[in-house]
Image (spheres, rainbow, N blue to C red):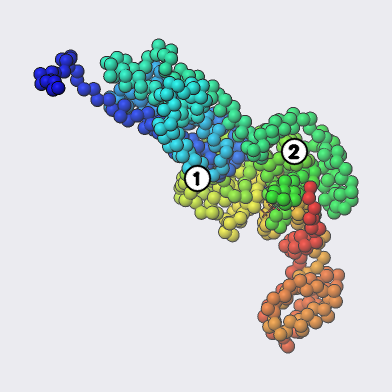
Amino acid sequence: MEVLLEYVKDMPKVGTSYRFDLSSLISPLFFTWIVELLFPVSVMLTYLVYEKQQKLKIMMKMQGLKDGPYWMISYGYFFVLSVVYMTFFVIFGSLIGLNFFRVNNYGIQIVFFFVYINLQIAFAFFVASFFSSVKIATVIGYIYVFGSGLLGAFLFRFFIEDINFSRGWILVMEIVPGFSLYRGLYELGQYAFSGNAMGATGMMWENLKDPINGMRDILIVMTVEWALMLVLAFYLDQVSSIGGSVGNPLLFFRCLQKKYAPPLQSSFVQQNHKVAVDMEKADVAQERHVVEQLLMDSNANQAIICDNLRKVYPGKDGNPDKLAVRGLSLALPKGQCFGMLGPNGAGKTSFISMMVGLTKPTSGTAYAHGMDIRMDMDDIYTNMGVCPQHDLLWETLTGKEHLFFYARLKNLKGAALVKAVNDSLKSVTLFHGGVGDKQVGKYSGGMKRRLSVAISLIGDPKVVYMDEPSTGLDPASRNNLWNIVKEAKRNRAIILTTHSMEEAEVLCDRLGIFVDGEFQCLGNPKELKARYGGAYIFTVTTPPEQESEIEQLVHRLSPSANKIYNLSGTQKFELPKQEVRIADVFHAVERAKSRLSIHAWGLVDTTLEDVFIKVAKGAPVFNDVA
Ligand SMILES: Nc1ncnc2c1ncn2[C@@H]1O[C@H](COP(=O)(O)OP(=O)(O)OP(=O)(O)O)[C@@H](O)[C@H]1O
């Protein structure tokens, strides 16, 4: 049967104009990405990890910046940046007419974005604790941003819209800051869309009570999480800054316990080192004794006292523990420069690291102007300067900005601050020609080194540590640097490590040759040369076929002469001083010249280098462990 519908028409209705809502097209995913992008890009995570990777944070700490101000400055910087970013975001969105911003209550938006940016900053501090490489942190940051947005839009959203899905589980998922952000933006979007479609308003304060509106829950979740995340981030930061790892959370509490432990009188007295002392060289044992006496004397006024410092690095992958410093005792008065000489791997940097608070001593301790490195490091930092082995500088800051920053940390202000910075730049020849105003990234290696030395001395610190300060400097710059150090040591105590015997002789009032974690000898350069250098060094170069005749000549001059070097006709002998007279050597060589081809020859007193080689070679090698 055929039904005729020819004259049937739609029921007439009231005409409406089409409302195009761009916000609903854009979707919360786009907004999530916009808001989250501040997290990994050049600020926040990258910035925090960069300072850690470049050890700039520890450098700032060593120059006197305490944890509280560091956190407040960094947090404040991120907060201001985020507020400006979000304000532009909301104003721009409103100006181009997006209902997402225009129809929802601005008060709700402000509270929501305020809580979120704080959570995001706390989250960046928290995540930064787990990374020490900027590249990895940035990649992970981007993965988090894009991943949380996509998962939010294509997974989390369906859970929200599925009325049968457990609300409890949704709350759990909203612990991920990316999801809570997505949820908030989703709710704002939903209210804006329905408000727009029905010609009503978007989300108002009273809508927070709506059973389907998740805004109230996420505001609570984000606020609680912000507070917890901050505490957790601070805790992890403390754990890592005391030389531990994030994987060892109990360390922090152990260190807190140690912090309030009563100071020891002298670990020397407590530990039975009698046997070790008996075996020690007399000067090293004497120094230990001096330290022991000073620790008993409450009026002792030494700049630095090291009391039986030990450092053991735990063995990894089945390797035994490494005893890097084996009970170092040393007393240093103000006005003295102490030089630490030692072969590679002797433990010099491990010692300096303990003194500047980079690592904790395994046992023993040290005092800088009476303050204990185990407990008072923050106070020690205000009066300490450090020139680390590797330059720790911001590539984008100028030399002058570095000095201003560190001088301010040392409480210099006004005219004194400007004078100190300019004097410092002049002293390391970085003042003229506007060099101080150039970015450090454009400096040569030598300029960076000179800047590091200037930083270590700015603000008149009373104790200064320099780890191989002249490494990489040309001879002229090195001489200049030596003059600075000579001037600087007048009213402070300086400990420097070096591989240059010349530097040690020029700068140091006292030296210690440090081999395999312990001092082999202590004394001023002259004493050491006199003690270990009872011989002249005779060097002679002839054609290789005349080597044996030279050897016979030397043994006629000094029967106990000892050949210490021989290469292609160049021979080096040690001639005991009691066996030879300098004049006899001169005569013998002059006579020999008539029958031998002597290209060059020389006779010198023992140098510090000879002493160093002799002591380092003669030192016992320990294969033992802690
Ligand atoms: N973090 C560490 N973990 C394990 N072993 C370490 C660690 N740091 C240093 N060591 C080891 O401790 C010993 C002393 O190292 P240290 O860097 O203190 O020597 P150094 O005298 O400063 O050497 P250089 O003159 O080459 O700088 C070395 O055998 C080194 O391998």
Residue 270 picture location, percent across and down = 86, 38
Q: Is the residue indicated by label 2 positioned so its CB lies within 8 Å of ligand 1? A: no
Residue reaching furthest left? 7
Left or right side of 273 for 182? left
Is 251 located above or below residue 552 in the figure?
above
Query: Which residue is nearer to you in this view: 554 or 262?
Result: 262
- Which residue appears at 50% of the width and 27% of the height? 173
Query: Which residue is nearer to you in this view: 218 or 438?
Result: 218
Q: Secondary structure at mark 1?
A: helix
Residue 28 picture location, percent across and down = 37, 28
- Which residue appears at 87% of the width and 49% of the height? 277
Q: CA distance from mark 1 to mark 2?
A: 39 Å
Left or right side of 98 for 315? right
**Picture quadrant of residue 296:** top right
Is 192 located above or below residue 594 in the figure?
above
Residue 182 picture location, percent across and down = 42, 28
Residue beneath disc 1 = 135
- Which residue appears at 71% of the width and 85% of the height? 545
Q: Secondary structure at mark 2?
A: strand
Identify the mark nearer the N-term, 1 or 2. 1
Residue 417 visible here: no
Q: Amino acid at mark 1?
A: Lys
Residue reaching furthest front? 1
Q: Is the residue indicated by label 1 positioned so its CB lies within 8 Å of ligand 1? A: no
Number of on-image labels: 2
The label on residue 367 is: 2
Query: Which residue is nearer to you in this view: 270 or 95?
Result: 95
Q: Nearer the viewer, mark 1 or mark 2?
A: 1
